[in-house]
Image (tube, helix red, strand yellow):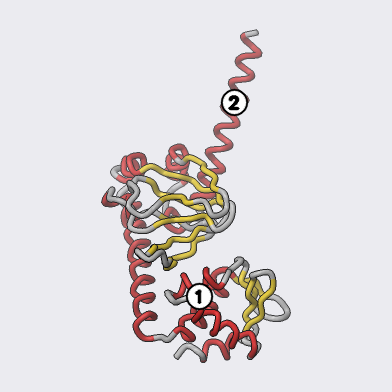
Amino acid sequence: MNMENGARQERQSNMERAALDEHAQFLGKVPIFSTLEPDELRELGAVARRRSYEAHEVIFHRNDPGNTLFVIRAGRVRIFLTSPEGQEVALALFRAGDAFGELALFDGQRRSASAMAIEPVEVYAIQRQDFMSIVMRRPHMALQLLATLSQRLRQTDSMVEDLLFLDVHGRVAKKLLELAGTHGVVTPEGVRIEMKLTQSDLAALVGASRESVNKVMSYLLAKRYVSAEKRKITVLRLAELRRRIT
């Protein structure tokens, strides 16, 4: 009996080590953690907890306590704000390998925006206390995190600039090109955006009304700049669409 218990415990230990190695291997591919050594990644993987969310499930709301960093293992997540009138503005779209919620790791303040699963999502959740405990011993992790925050700030600046200087037509064209670059798959017809987008979704991404975006999309479809099937958009004429950004 003792031998059986010992063998069972060893198998369990081997499974746990394999799981930690899997966590560490995945986290090592995430830009925010790409400079970490294997032992550091295993330490981080040991405190990461896997969570799952259904499509359209809210991961956190604006003003929720901010004490967790999320790393997407599978699926896509939308970060957004909601106006007092109920209109949503999407700030960012994240996919597998991206991290979000990192601002809370520095200040521990409430969430500045909401996050929702676009489709079934699986994440690694890392608590601020656990993360900061590791950072205190690995200062270079903080530098990598600062670089990520700087990149996010530049993206926000770009969004504000688009709202100020581009009309709805230009913003839609630019967003479609951006999505084609980050979520696109090359096909014989063009670049298909591998994300189901309603016109309400696209309106939220460009900070415009659904009616305005509907007019722009009708024009782009009629001119064969893009095609749409089953809520997936294919960019047919990249160069011509790029010239619409004026």
Q: Secondary structure at mark 2?
A: helix
Residue 59's place in the image compared with 78, above or below, is above
For mark 2, what is the residue?
12
The residue lying toward the viewer, choosing from 58 and 192, is 58
Left-right relation of 242 to 87: right
Q: Position of residue 172 (x, y in %)?
A: 50, 80
Q: Position of residue 14 (x, y in %)?
A: 59, 30
State the quadrant of the N terminus.
top right
Left-right relation of 17 to 153: right
Query: Callout 2: 10 Å neighbours few (<14), some, many (20+)?
Result: few
Query: Callout 1: 10 Å neighbours few (<14), some, many (20+)?
Result: some
Task: Count every numbered label the image shows and give the total.
Answer: 2
Nearer-N-terminus badge (1/2): 2
- Are dots 1 and 2 in contact, CB under 8 Å? no
For mark 1, what is the residue?
210
**Image-quadrant location for residue 161:** bottom left
Question: What residue appears at the point 63 percent right and 20 percent down from the top-left corner?
Answer: 8
**Going by the picture, which residue comes out furthest to the top?**
1
**Going by the picture, which residue comes out furthest to the front?**
85
Q: Amino acid at mark 2?
A: Gln
1 vs 2, front mark: 1
**Going by the picture, which residue comes out furthest to the right?**
188
Q: Position of residue 182 (x, y in %)?
A: 54, 70
Q: Amino acid at mark 1?
A: Arg
Q: Position of residue 108 (x, y in %)?
A: 28, 48
Question: What residue appears at the point 27 percent right and 50 percent down from the top-left corner?
Answer: 109
